Image (cartoon, coloured by chain):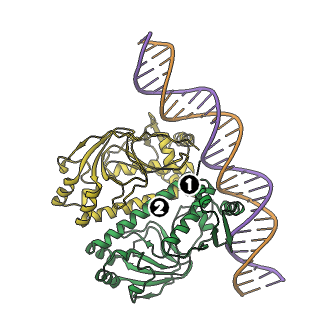
Chain colours: A green, B yellow, C purple, D orange
Amino acid sequence: MKLVVGNACTRHEMEAVPQDCSQCAVREIAVCTALSRPELERLRGIAVTKIYEPGSTLFAAEEATTMVGAVVQGTIKCFKLLADGRQQVVGFLFPGDFVGSPTQETTHCFAEALTKVELCVFPFPAIQRLIREMPSLERRLLQLANEDLDLAQEWMLLLGRKTAQERLATFLLLLAQKARARGVAEGPIDLPMNRSEIADYLGLTIETVSRQFSKLKASGHIRVAHNNEVTIRNLDGLTEIAEGAA
Amino acid sequence: MKLVVGNACTRHEMEAVPQDCSQCAVREIAVCTALSRPELERLRGIAVTKIYEPGSTLFAAEEATTMVGAVVQGTIKCFKLLADGRQQVVGFLFPGDFVGSPTQETTHCFAEALTKVELCVFPFPAIQRLIREMPSLERRLLQLANEDLDLAQEWMLLLGRKTAQERLATFLLLLAQKARARGVAEGPIDLPMNRSEIADYLGLTIETVSRQFSKLKASGHIRVAHNNEVTIRNLDGLTEIAEGAA
DNA sequence: CGAACTGTTGAATAAGGTCAAACCAGGTGG
DNA sequence: CCACCTGGTTTGACCTTATTCAACAGTTCG
């Protein structure tokens, strides 16, 4: 068991109204995909762009929800804590992903920027009002919530039943797939998180994660550069491992 | 690792249109809570009551979604499988709970009746149409999806970071809390699932689950009757264990 | 260059898994 | 009525995987 990471809740923010959604890097994949031109305008009306520095906290758990948002750039870590500091990462969020629960008055996890993050923020009471008035927005949020739920359950399978090796293989394939989904060119996978954060996502320790990286390198499934760039050299093999081929 | 449980996909069903929603046991807690009288009538228009015998399958994973529904009576187990038969239960559903994903064209887990189940079924194309036409229904589904997501993430914390003892304590408290939420009178908690299913929910083996039951009995936190009736004798103590008090 | 991090590797340990036997309650049938 | 079977559960002994503890290597930064 590990002691608490004592993040001092630093909030470095800057505000600005988004200039033009049609220029937005995530226009085609984020919440706003489903919206018509006039609807998009209304959403833009309540949106604010915020920049978070690496390590800064977007919000903590069990506090009143003040906002939700769409990641435009950077990576966010969402996690839960136990009393003694044990941490479980419940998700890494990339450009296009949605942060926060739009229907719940209080938050249930911590959200922290891993890199410099550009977030399209929708302040809370405003977004709730807008949801009531725009069924297409609500429909999109329902769709996203169902996808998130599905991913969470897939992760329950990983945490409850997969071996360390299978977990890491699954993780790398997930990152590759998410990168593809947001249109990142094929090539090495970027790991914006460190070993400790990977461990907290996979329910392992940093040492075990490191050993599994070494094994996957040794068996020729992956190649690693600078500890944060992974190339998959044997996709089929890695997939077999990830799925626990009998 | 355990071999596949080879459930032979038996489907024992009976159909009937619900007579009168105002008489329904879960009217106040299920999806339909949020609906007005006329809206409720429309939902009833597409609903069908089905009875499932214990052990029968409601649907399998990775097949086309044919229906979603509200549990009226009984308990359902939702689970995922790995290629070699390892199983992870992603949720137990009780009266008032919603089964299935209303926005996804294909299922992602198996659903099986643990007891005799009475289900208020909403056939798939019909419910999708209805959602588009009834924002209040959609809002309620979004709310339920967010709650489910939250529970799933809480379970990720359990599976990734809690000890066997903490897992069982958390599980018992969850059952107690869910029973309370659906208005079951205080008293012993009923366990409609066996040790194997508990193990598959907690990411443990049946032996470990059994040992932890014994420990909680020995320490006076719980009392167990007939293996399926648990009385919590020390709520505060159990809560401390569940939350991993440092 | 040395301090402070982060990551890797090795050796010892522990939590939970595996295997096997005993237990126990609820049915069945003589 | 009671012996017997059967399935689920409990308990014990041993083993494996991942954790813990510790040393070391590679980077970054003052």
The circle drawn on residue A151 is 2
Q: Amino acid at mark 2?
A: Leu
Q: Could you tell me if residue B244 is visible in this image?
A: no
Q: Where A105 falls versus B42 (above or below)?
A: below
Q: Chain of mark 2?
A: A
Residue B9 appears in the picture as rendered: yes
Quarter of the figure that contains the N terminus of chain B: top right
Circle on res. A243: 1
Q: Above or below — where is A175 with respect to D6?
A: below
Label 1 Cα neighbours within 10 Å, binned few <14 / some 14-19 / many ≥20: some
Find the residue positioned furthest to the left. Answer: B38
Front tag of 2 and 1:
1
Q: Name the one closer to the observer, A72 or B183.
A: A72
Residue B57 falls in which quadrant of the image?
Answer: top left
Residue B8 is situated, as x and y percent measured from the top left of the image, at 43, 39
Q: Secondary structure at mark 1?
A: loop
Q: Position of residue A192 (x, y in %)?
A: 59, 74
